């Protein structure tokens, strides 16, 4: 069996996603949860690149454009997330996600 | 001496200034105020004399001075002064009699604490009265007429702390005002028809030929020509002011005022204003109107003399005699002899002022006792007062030849006899002569002869010269004035009619009437003496019954109650008035107020209905819906745990489910 | 031409005063009093200025200020002044300071009589100035839009003045007053809305032009014209008031504090008559003419029943209030008679000018004498309150006819001034009341003789109840309140009454001072009496 690059890429990104999900679900440190989420996002970005590069239609630079936007959004998101985390820390002197539940309806 | 009409205003202005001084001076300045009042009126008297000489120089002329009061539309309202013999004679009389009465008041009112105010009001009265006399405009005349009424009101109510005086003042004002409203309507009608209220205005005045002609040709209203209607309405004013039947009721009550006031206002001057008015507007009066005036005058003459027979109050007897004499004057106007009326007015002013001042002298001496039953025997104690009072009485009764009242009454009787109209006034006047002689005999007998019937009468003594001097002067004129108008040489009547020549005729021409009236006077005096003079000795106590009351008790009582006029008016007009007032008030409170209240209740009711509908219907529906929405919202909010891991777990489960769907669906 | 907006100054200076009073916290009562009085006197000062520049012979409004305000609705800010307005501005300028002086105790630091929760002199002062400004606005506005604003705005301060400082029944009376009057004006507002739809303008001068040439009637066909007329009529009839829309008046005048009663009768009742003259008569000549026989009957009702009802009152304030109904009915009677005679084949010129001059004079004179009478009753009320406070409680007691006696002995100066006011009110010649009444009677007699004859009944009844008042309170032995100490006028009361009484005498002797202001205007009105 020849090793197609597309399935390989997809397998890799799935693994990355699962790693990120497990990390986000398992850790209680909010920064680590955020890291997990970033991993999941990057898995999605990897898929964009893979489908663009090895997909049936190779229109110029669509996948790359998507990813660039996505990375920019992720950066902004991380900044906001970290700011929130600092605010939470100031408030309750730790960053345990389980305890940051006071905004519930 | 001559006086231009332009300066005629000085005559009323001088007393007005005195009144102003009186109003502005503090209470302590009594002598200043009294002095100013007397000096001002005396000066007015001298100016009036100048006016009289001017007027007599050309008796037919009406000297006028008109001026603009204010502008009204395209027209102006003009007032003016008028100088003719009528004005001049009246002014001279008023200022002369007035001055004497002012001087008398110095003594009479000496102890009164409102002495200053008294002279202030007297001056105000004099100013208004003189203004009335010199007015050349019915409007100005009406203005002064009302001011005279005000002064009379203030002076009748001068002792206002006495409720009876306050009530009498109000009664006088209201009763005369009823007449004044007729006057006002007549004035308005005349103004509307003639377009002016000036009496003489170079041919455009209402008393001049143009206006009279226009009025005469005006249409008739309800069978009465416009001119007659206007004349009768103006006469209403005179009826009120001059105490004519049926508005005579206020005059006797007006005797509540101080006696000098009764003398000046309610005998000599103000009450004569009605006669003056009728003489003034005489050219306006039509035969129809004159007939009514004559009959009203005759009724009044008779009525006053009849009621006077059974009165006990010294001043009230004189008041009713005034009513009766004013009736004679009106009668004279009515039978077409205004000059005879004015002649009688002038003589009456002097002898009635004399009588009132004499009465004042008696009352003052007898410690304010004015019931003739309490008096008696004063002829010895007050000789001067008695002598002058007797002269006044004889003038009033018309004792032949030597007393002024005889000649002026004679002139009236002659005119009444000669009239072309009804002869009722003539006979009424003759009966009046008898009655007048009768009640005056009674008055003299009861007051001055016999025994003093009370402590006050027994201790009376003659008054000071300040009070007796005016009596003497007035007594002189009560005799002398008659000779100005005897049938032999009727100078006064001629001048008043605007003639320069005097057409006298021998006494023998009308000798029948002369003898008849003298006989009637003798009859009256005789009857009076028979009934009262002879019984005087027997009556020593105030409680002794009146001889007439013994002879005819019911008639006497009826007359004593003044023919029950007051009761009649109270039972008719009084009741109507009260009814109207009550009805108006009730209507306001119940009907109009009720409608408004009902509307308000209606509004309140609809408001209640509206509110209930809102509360029970609309609001309940909205409330229920909102409650449900809120409940569901709460249910959803429970899913919001705040546990971020929980949310992620949901995400993961979702991801797995999606993957499974994709894989299994893709497989299929 | 003066560039200073004089009329705006006249209207708004009192309001500026009210704002200043409201903003200045913690001023001493003496300053408050001085400021209030100074601002209320501004009207008199400014109308003095107006008098020097006013030209009575010009028939159109003078000192006109006209600016576009809401162009979409064709609304203009339009002020103007003619003889009629000037007369009423002068009256307002005279009455308001007098009313404030009569309310001096409410403006004092610790009011001896006031039991109201808000005994704040600043509030009283600013409410009064607001009221004054609104009344002036009504007399000067020439566009319905802001005229109506002023008209309604005047009710608000009046309401609070009555409710907060009035007698025991004041809240009820104040509510009745406001609701009744607003009820009337609501109909008027609807009427003017219809007029606006039909004519496209709310300017009085333009509307009067349309009314005169009959365009308005053509634009409101099928009875709409008459309905609009009735609506506007109702608004004014309640305000004056025309009998039988008067039932709010006795209670209101009786319960209001003295100063407010003076202003209500002296100025606000004139707003209604002014409305009749300025708005109803010029804009609706034909409907008014058609309704005139009925309206004459109503005016006579006011003249006669007003006077007779007054006779029955034992509360002096109610009595004076009824006399107001009687006196204002004369004004309306004259106007209705003029309208009645318009277009009939009679020579109406002299009679009409007499009637209209009489109406204007009567408005002014009634303002003076009725305000003076209320001031007199206020003095009696103060004395009674003093007498009561010595024995029992305090408060503003009602003043009954039988509570006094022999006041003339106790307080001769007061008696003199009150007597003059009474006699002026009953139309004694030599005082101001006579001239107006005489001219009204002269005019009405020429236009409708029967009405004049019936109206004389009112004259008689007026004399009866005013003399009863005088006799019961001032004459007789000292009794009731007067039996104990009863002081004569103090300087403030003297300052209230003396100018009013002096003016009564001045205008009684020289009515030309007043008629000169409006005679050309009246003449032109009387000369152009035609129906389209």
Image: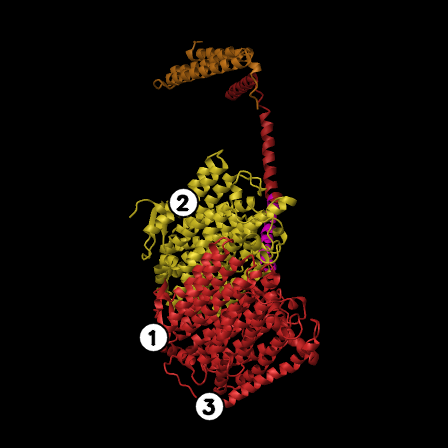
Chain colours: A orange, B red, C yellow
Q: Name the magenta segment's main secondary structure.
A: helix
* Residue C389 lies in quadrant: top right
Residue B498 drawn at (x, y percent): 38, 79
User: In the rendering, at what x and y percent does residue B537 appear?
Assistant: 69, 77
Q: Which residue is mark 3?
A: B509
| SS for dot 1 | loop
Q: Chain of mark 3?
A: B
Q: Is residue B605 left or right of residue B271?
A: right
| Residue marked by disc 2 | C42
Most foreground residue, C525 or C433: C433
Which one is closest to the eye, mark 2 or mark 3?
3
- Say yes or no: labels 2 and 3 on the same chain: no
- Residue C431 horizontal side relative to residue A92, left or right: left
Residue underneath mark 1: B203
As measured in the structure, the alpha-carbon distance from the residue carrying label 3 to the one carrying label 1 is: 39 Å
- Identify the secondary structure beneath mark 2: helix
Q: Is residue C463 visible?
A: no
- Magenta region, residue range: B589-614
User: Where is B371 relative to B502, above or below?
Assistant: above
Which structural element holds mark 3?
A: helix
Chain letter for mark 2, please.
Answer: C
Q: Quick check: C32 above or below C511? A: above
Residue B405 screen position, x and y as percent: 51, 79
Say which of marks 1 and 2 sits in front.
1
Looking at the picture, tell me which residue is in the foreground, B440 or B246: B440
Is residue A78 something that shows in the picture?
yes
Q: Are marks 1 and 2 in contact (CB under 8 Å)?
A: no
- Looking at the rendered image, the quarter that the N terminus of chain B falls into is bottom left
Same chain? Circles 1 and 2: no
- Is the residue marked by circle 1 packed among few (<14), some (14-19), or many (20+) residues within 10 Å? few
| Tag nearer the camera, 3 or 1 | 3
Task: Measure the alpha-carbon separation of dots 1 and 2.
Answer: 51 Å
């Amino acid at each position: 069996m020849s090793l197609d690059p597309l399935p390989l890429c997809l397998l890799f990104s799935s693994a990355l996603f699962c790693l990120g999900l497990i990390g986000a679900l398992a850790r209680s440190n909010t920064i680590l949860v955020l890291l997990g989420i970033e991993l999941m996002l990057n898995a999605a970005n990897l898929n964009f690149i893979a489908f663009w590069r090895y997909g049936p239609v190779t229109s110029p630079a669509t996948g790359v454009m998507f990813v660039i936007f996505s990375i920019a959004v992720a950066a902004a998101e991380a900044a906001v997330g970290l700011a929130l985390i600092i605010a939470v820390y100031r408030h309750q002197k730790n960053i345990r996600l389980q305890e940051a539940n006071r905004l519930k309806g | 001496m001559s006086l231009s009409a332009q300066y005629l205003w000085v005559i009323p202005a001088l007393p007005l200034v005195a009144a102003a001084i009186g109003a502005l001076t503090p209470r302590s300045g009594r002598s200043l105020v009294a002095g100013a009042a007397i000096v001002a009126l005396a000066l007015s008297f001298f100016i009036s004399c100048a006016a009289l000489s001017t007027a007599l120089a050309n008796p037919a002329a009406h000297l006028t001075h008109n001026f603009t009061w204010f502008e009204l539309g395209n027209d102006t309202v003009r007032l003016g002064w008028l100088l003719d013999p009528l004005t001049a004679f009246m002014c001279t009389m008023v200022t002369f009699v007035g001055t004497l009465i002012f001087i008398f008041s110095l003594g009479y009112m000496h102890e009164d604490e409102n002495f200053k105010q008294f002279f202030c009001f007297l001056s105000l009265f004099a100013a208004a009265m003189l203004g009335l006399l010199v007015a050349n405009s019915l409007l100005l005349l009406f203005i002064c007429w009302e001011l005279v009424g005000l002064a009379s009101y203030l002076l009748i109510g001068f002792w206002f702390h006495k409720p009876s005086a306050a009530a009498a003042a109000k009664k006088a004002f209201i009763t005369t005002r009823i007449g004044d409203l007729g006057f006002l309507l007549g004035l308005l009608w005349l103004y509307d028809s003639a377009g002016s209220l000036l009496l003489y205005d170079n041919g455009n005045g209402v008393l001049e030929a143009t206006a009279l002609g226009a009025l005469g040709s005006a249409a008739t209203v309800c069978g009465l020509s416009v001119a007659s209607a206007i004349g009768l309405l103006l006469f209403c004013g005179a009826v009120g002011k001059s105490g004519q039947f049926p508005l005579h009721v206020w005059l006797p009550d007006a005797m509540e005022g101080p006696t000098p006031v009764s003398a000046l206002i309610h005998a000599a001057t103000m009450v004569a204003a009605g006669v003056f008015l009728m003489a003034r507007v005489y050219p306006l009066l039509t035969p129809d109107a004159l007939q009514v005036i004559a009959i009203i005058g005759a009724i009044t003459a008779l009525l006053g003399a009849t009621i006077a027979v059974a009165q006990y109050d010294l001043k009230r007897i004189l008041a009713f005699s005034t009513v009766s004499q004013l009736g004679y004057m009106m009668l004279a106007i009515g039978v077409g002899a205004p000059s005879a009326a004015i002649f009688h007015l002038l003589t009456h002013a002097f002898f009635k002022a004399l009588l009132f001042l004499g009465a004042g002298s008696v009352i003052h001496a007898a410690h304010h006792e004015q019931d003739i039953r309490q008096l008696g025997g004063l002829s010895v104690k007050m000789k001067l007062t008695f002598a002058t009072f007797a002269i006044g009485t004889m003038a009033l009764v018309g004792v032949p030849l030597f007393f002024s009242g005889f000649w002026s009454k004679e002139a009236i009787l002659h005119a009444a006899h000669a009239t072309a109209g009804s002869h009722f006034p003539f006979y009424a006047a003759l009966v009046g002569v008898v009655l007048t002689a009768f009640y005056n005999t009674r008055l003299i007998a009861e007051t001055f002869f016999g025994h003093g019937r009370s402590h006050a009468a027994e201790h009376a003594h003659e008054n000071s010269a300040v009070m007796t001097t005016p009596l003497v002067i007035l007594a002189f004129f009560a005799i002398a004035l008659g000779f100005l108008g005897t049938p032999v040489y009727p100078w006064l009547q001629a001048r008043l009619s605007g003639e320069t020549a005097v057409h006298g005729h021998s006494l023998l021409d009308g000798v029948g009437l002369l003898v008849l009236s003298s006989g009637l006077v003798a009859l009256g005096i005789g009857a009076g003496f028979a009934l009262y003079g002879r019984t005087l000795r027997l009556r020593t106590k105030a409680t002794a019954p009146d001889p007439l009351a013994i002879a005819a008790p019911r008639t006497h009582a009826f007359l004593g109650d003044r023919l029950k006029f007051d009761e009649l008016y109270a039972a008719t007009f009084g009741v109507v008035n009260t009814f109207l007032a009550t009805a108006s008030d009730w209507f306001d409170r119940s009907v109009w107020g009720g409608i408004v209240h009902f509307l308000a209740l209606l509004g309140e009711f609809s408001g209640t209905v509206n509110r209930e509908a809102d509360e029970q219907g609309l609001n309940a529906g909205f409330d229920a819906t909102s409650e449900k929405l809120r409940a569901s919202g709460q249910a959803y909010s429970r899913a919001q745990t705040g546990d971020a891991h929980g949310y992620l777990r949901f995400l993961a489960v979702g991801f797995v489910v999606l993957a499974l769907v994709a894989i299994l669906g893709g497989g299929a | 031409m003066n560039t200073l907006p004089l009329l705006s100054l006249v209207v708004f200076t009192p309001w500026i005063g009210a704002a200043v009073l409201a903003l200045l916290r913690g001023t001493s009562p003496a300053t408050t009093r001085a400021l209030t009085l100074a601002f209320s006197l501004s009207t008199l000062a400014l109308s003095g200025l107006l008098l020097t520049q006013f030209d009575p012979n010009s028939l159109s409004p003078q000192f006109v200020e006209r600016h576009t305000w809401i162009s979409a609705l064709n609304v203009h800010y339009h002020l103007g002044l003619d003889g009629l307005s000037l007369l009423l501005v002068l009256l307002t300028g005279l009455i308001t300071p007098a009313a404030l002086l009569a309310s001096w105790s409410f403006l004092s630091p610790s009011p001896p009589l006031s039991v109201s929760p808000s005994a704040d002199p600043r509030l009283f002062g600013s409410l009064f100035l607001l009221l004054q400004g609104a009344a002036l606005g009504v007399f000067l506005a020439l566009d319905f839009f802001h005229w109506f604003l002023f008209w309604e705005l005047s009710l608000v301060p009046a309401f609070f003045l009555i409710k907060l400082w009035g007698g025991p029944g004041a809240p009820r009376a104040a509510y009745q007053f406001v609701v009744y009057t607003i009820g009337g004006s609501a109909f008027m507002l609807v009427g003017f809305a219809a007029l606006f739809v039909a004519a496209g303008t709310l300017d009085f001068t333009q509307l009067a032009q349309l009314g005169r040439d009959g365009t308005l009637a053509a634009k409101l066909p099928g009875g709409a014209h008459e309905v609009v007329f009735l609506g506007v009529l109702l608004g004014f009839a309640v305000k004056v008031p025309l009998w039988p829309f008067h039932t709010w008046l006795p209670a209101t005048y009786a319960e209001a504090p003295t100063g407010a009663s003076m202003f209500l009768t002296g100025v606000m009742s004139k707003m209604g008559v002014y409305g009749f003259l300025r708005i109803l008569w010029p804009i609706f000549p034909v409907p008014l003419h058609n309704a005139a026989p009925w309206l004459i009957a109503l005016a006579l009702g006011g003249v006669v029943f007003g006077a007779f009802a007054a006779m029955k009152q034992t509360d002096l304030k109610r009595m004076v209030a009824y006399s107001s109904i009687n006196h204002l009915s004369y004004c309306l009677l004259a106007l209705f008679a003029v309208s009645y005679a318009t277009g009939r084949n009679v020579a109406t010129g002299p009679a009409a000018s007499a009637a209209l001059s009489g109406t204007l004079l009567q408005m002014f004179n009634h303002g003076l004498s009725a305000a003076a009478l209320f001031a007199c009753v206020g003095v009696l009320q103060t004395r009674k309150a003093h007498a009561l406070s010595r024995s029992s409680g305090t408060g503003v007691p009602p003043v009954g006819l039988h509570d006094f006696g022999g006041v003339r002995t106790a307080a001769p100066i007061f008696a003199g001034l009150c007597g003059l006011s009474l006699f002026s009110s009953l139309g004694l010649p030599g005082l101001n009341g006579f001239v107006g009444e005489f001219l009204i009677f002269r005019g009405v007699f020429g236009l409708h003789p029967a009405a004049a004859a019936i109206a004389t009944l009112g004259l008689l009844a007026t004399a009866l109840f005013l003399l009863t008042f005088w006799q019961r309170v001032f004459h007789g032995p000292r009794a009731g309140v007067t039996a104990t100490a009863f002081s004569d006028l103090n300087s403030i009361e003297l300052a209230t009454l003396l100018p009013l009484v002096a003016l009564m005498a001045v205008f009684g002797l020289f009515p030309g001072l007043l008629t000169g202001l409006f005679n050309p205007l009246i003449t032109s009105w009387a000369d152009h009496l035609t129906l389209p």
